[in-house]
Image: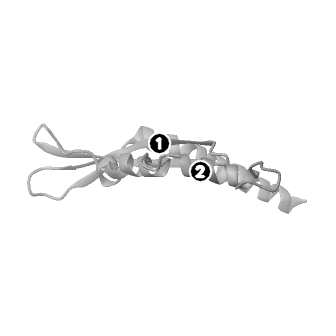
Amino acid sequence: MPTETGSVSPESARSSRQEQRPSAAPSVPERLAEQLQSLGVARTFGEPLQVGGDTVVPVALVQYGFGGGGDADGAAGGGGGGLALPLGAYTGRGDGPATFRPNTVALLAVLIPLVWTAGRAVARVVRAAKK
């Protein structure tokens, strides 16, 4: 909108820029939602495999994180990442019950830092109690 001097105010210039943007292009969250529809149980439990007469279903811990933002001028950015940790597998033969067999390497990779941290915390509590 022109002001008394004939120039355009910053607010109206910003709103006219926003009106000129094409609205047909999907936003970043919409595109992420489309791509992430296949995540979930299919990523946590793998496809059943036949190995030597046994049925094996791999199991993993799957985590994803995403973030993004923008400012009033239309500048935007975002990012994301993920982690998949193989926990083990369910195995079964025929109609019998399935049993879970943990992945000992992944279990150790998770438990060793946890036990070390807990040990340090207990040592600090004991040291503080002695003072």
Query: Residue 48 occupies which quadrant of the picture?
Result: top left
Residue 91, how many percent across, how many down?
A: 22, 48
Could you say where residue 76 lies in the image, as x and y percent from the top left?
61, 43
Q: Nearer the viewer, residue 37 or 112?
A: 37
Label 1 SS: strand
Identify the residue under disc 1: 83
In contact (CB < 8 Å): disc 2 and disc 1: no
Foreground of the two, 108 or 126: 108
The residue to which callout 2 is attached is 18
Position of residue 89 in the picture relative to residue 18 (left or right): left
Question: Which residue occupies the extreme bottom position in the image?
Answer: 129
**Residue 64 visible from this viewpoint:** no
- Mark 1 is surrounded, within 10 Å at the Cα level, by few (under 14), some (14 to 19) or many (20 or more) other residues, namely few
The answer, for residue 42, to whether it is visible in the render is yes
Residue type at numbered disc 1: Leu
Using residue 126 as the reference point, say whether residue 17 is left or right of it: left
Judge by depth and name the residue closer to the eye, 72 or 121: 72
Q: Nearer the viewer, mark 2 or mark 1?
A: 2
Coloration of the structure image: one colour
- Identity of the residue drawn at 62% across and 51% down: 16
Q: Position of residue 115 (x, y in %)?
A: 60, 49
Labels 2 and 1: the sequence-earlier one: 2
Q: Quadrant of the C terminus?
A: bottom right
